[in-house]
Image (spheres, helix red, strand yellow):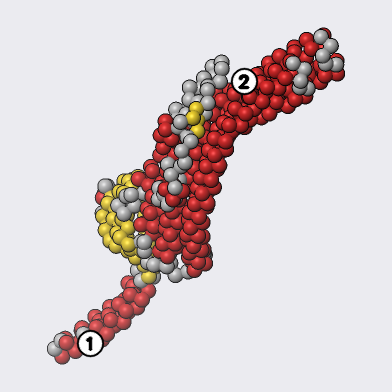
Amino acid sequence: MDSVSHALSGAGHEVKAAEDTADALKALNRPVITASAQYLEYQKTLSLDLSGAKSDAASATDSFLSGLPSQFPPAFQQIVGEVAGRVEQALPGLLSAIPDTLRYQYRDDVFRPTVQAVMPLYTGGAIPAIQHGALAGADIARAKQAQARELSTVNLVRVYFGQQVASQLLVSATDVRDAFDRHLSDAQKLEQQGVIPHATTLQVQVARDAAERSRLRAELDARTASDELGRLLDADGGVTPTTALFVDARPLPPVGDFLGGSDLPRAREADATRKLADAGTALAKSRFLPQAYAFGEYNFDHKQALPIEPDWVVGVGVRYTLLSNIDRRKTLDAAREHARAAADAAADVRKTLTTETVRAYDLVETARRSFLLLDSNIAAAQENLRVQQISFREGEASGAAVTDAIAALQTAETQRIATAYEYDLALAGLLAASGRLDEFSDFLSRADHRLALPRP
């Protein structure tokens, strides 16, 4: 079953995917380093306003020229004054040659190979929350895998022993049909001897035909059960059971021995779901806190760098969301409600598991007691059929009495087969509910009642 079940294989893949996801998120605290290369073509225009500078220069020059004659001896002051006046008159013309605005335009193309690094320093708990959520997801996948294995095993018990039930019922139906054949033969002989009327023979004939129809239905059911087991195990040639239906006459251990299991797959899944919800709450809380990070960039080609670009840069930064388009308070409230719901679900799962375990325990015990009571019923039914057949041959019993005796024996045998099957299936359910399904083979080996394997 382990090697051919697609459900188990799929659950295994889900576990591997969840574990890989958790492993992939272990390094979220490490820096993210990226390399990039860009080819750029750009144009830069620079404009410089010189009008203010020209005005200041003219004013300063006028002031200088005006005070210049006083700095020379009286004999030279007139000459210096005349020269300064001529310069002052020529100054506006000189300054007018300088434009009011200086404009410079540059166009070039560059290749920029760079490497960047960003490392989170503080995320408000977002990274641990994400990592814990991933680990909880892996726990959920493993718990579901265990549940799939349990379900697969219980289903195998159902189909494997169900095939035997169908085969046993076919044997029983065939025996009943044969018994009616013998009864019909006796009735025909007695009719020929004049002991019973023809109507009695007809009644036996009707009962015999009904038994044959029941045998045909049982044959179809047996074929269907065999095909189901073959398909379940991908066995085109079918499967021949070697383990018989079984019942242990001894009572089970106290029901308390089957309660309180801490490693139950469904309980593990509920606990992991609660942890996942708690991680969601922590992640929602982190959105109210600032984030700090370190960053750096290095340019491999300094000569090609833009004028305003550094050769390398490192630094730290802090980011805080002042206004978000998502209501962070409502998000946190929702996460807390999910956590409360998960906690309630985990508690409810444990109650449900306890109830299912007690119910399965009662089913096993009921099937065990019923099976033991049926042993005496079958013995009595066999003896009753023997007596009724002898009485009928001697003309002391009616044909209906023999028919009823055959039917009573068939009912008892059918109930015994069905009860053994109910015991085995209920036992598998009990062990699955209590997390002890791997002990099924131990219970099987200790059983002291085994039904004979169906005849091929």
Q: Residues within 10 Å of mark 1 (few under 14, many from 20)?
A: few
**Which quadrant of the view contains residue 416?**
top right
Residue 193 shows up from this direction: yes
Q: Which quadrant does the C terminus fall into?
A: top right
Image position of 349 (left or right of 118): right
Residue drawn at (32%, 62%) of the image: 122
**Residue 268 drawn above or below residue 370:** below
Element type at mark 2 = helix
Distance Cα–Cα, label 2 vs label 1: 139 Å
Foreground pick, 174 / 78: 174
Determine contact: label 2, label 1, CB under 8 Å: no
412 to the left or right of 121: right
Residue type pointed to by label 1: Gly
Name the residue beneath numbered marker 2. 171
Amino acid of disc 2: Val
- Residue 347 lies, with reference to residue 14, above or below; the image says below
Q: Earlier in the sequence, mark 2 or mark 1?
A: 1
Rendered image: mark on residue 325: none
**Is 149 rendered above or below residue 237?**
below
Question: 205 above or below 248?
Answer: above
Q: Secondary structure under badge 1?
A: helix
